[in-house]
Image: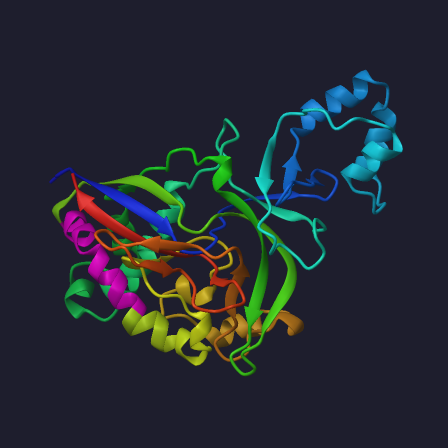
Amino acid sequence: MTEYHQFEFTLTTLAPVHIGEGKTITTKEFLYEEGEERGYYYFPDMPTLYNQVCKIGFQKQFEQYLLGKGERDLRGFFKDHQIKENQFGGYRVKETGYESKDKGKLNNIDAFIKDTYGNPYIPGSSLKGALRTILVNRHFHTDTDNVKRGASKNGINEIFNEIRVSDSEPIPFERLLICQKWDVNAKKGIPNPLPVFREALTPFTRVKFTITTTTARAHYLISGLEDMAKQFYESNYYPRFLKVFPSKFLQPNYRAPLYLGAGSGLWSKVDHQHVDITSIRRHTPGKMKMKLNGALKLTKSRKVSFRRKGSVERHELITNDENLYEMGKCGFRIKEV
């Protein structure tokens, strides 16, 4: 029987969050601009840039530049051909100062997903995947009653068809940053930077979604989502994975915890009871092979603090002095409307 209920879901990023779209921005497609205090990474609209370059007679040279294997970046091309850095559309991302040791010099960047109008957003499918992880681990994990009610793989899929998650509204470009991937090995506890760079949402970005349930059982699940998210963190994610890492790298929870997007790590995405770690290790190339339960995934950004409602005291999102955040960490609240 169809039974519609609607919920307002408010996501707050507690760390940089990257939702990818499979697109890489090469070093030939962006440039760094100096600023008074902090600079900007400028991502021109490439079709607009191409048309402008063609108009001033450098079509052949620009095509050779794009297709060539040279190390010149976009600024180098402009300088070589005396092209003024006019407005070529696109957007700018303000630097944090923690992108890399070499100011303004990055490798290719994994792009944040954009809608058909070119604006950043979070697809409902991405959020739904994170919610599924929580529910699979806390509601469908060992409950024999759930199995009797059809909580097989097909049964779970059927229930999730009764939960509809909207895409978010467009997110302002001002809420984007560029961040680098850092890993912490459980044995050594020392953060190591990796040559992976991502567009991500800044810490303490608020994003709203609408969740619609179409049956009584789906309504029951979503109504208990906050409690199950806390249970997943306390009974699954922390004891199974986080507890072996230095506490200074673990962020305090804010509202109900949730990990979202690329780079947040295996254990934030899998069914803890049925994951086959041996198989994962067997099918992973030697240098990338998972050791123990894997590395803690971190990234760097500027420190952010906030005030809780009714309090004058400010709270820091991170407790370490190295500006390291847990990649993809968020908090959420949900209310029926």
Determine the image quadrant of residue 311.
bottom left
Camera-nearest residue between 265 and 319: 319
Extent of the magenta region: 217-233
Q: Residue furthest bottom?
A: 187
Camera-nearest residue between 119 and 82: 82
Report the number of discs.
0
Q: Main secondary structure of the magenta part?
A: helix
Determine the image quadrant of residue 260.
bottom left
128 part of magenta stretch: no
How is the model colour-coded?
A: rainbow
Asked if 139 appears above or below 68 in the picture, the reply is below
Camera-nearest residue between 142 and 120: 120
- The residue positioned 47% from the left and 69% from the top of the image is 320
Q: Position of residue 7 (x, y in %)?
A: 21, 42
Asked if 188 appears above or below 95 in the picture, the reply is below
Q: Residue furthest top?
A: 55
Q: Position of residue 315 (x, y in %)?
A: 35, 60
Horizontally, is 22 left or right of 2 in the view? Answer: right
- The residue positioned 50% from the left and 54% from the top of the image is 262
Q: Position of residue 222 (x, y in %)?
A: 20, 51
In the rendered image, the quadrant that contains the N terminus is top left
Q: Position of residue 91 (x, y in %)?
A: 59, 32
Question: Could you tell me if residue 152 is visible in this image?
Answer: no
Horizontally, is 158 left or right of 252 in the view? Answer: left
- The residue positioned 35% from the left and 53% from the top of the image is 306
- The residue positioned 79% from the left and 23% from the top of the image is 53
Question: Could you tell me if residue 35 is visible in this image?
Answer: yes
In the rendered image, the quadrant that contains the C terminus is top left
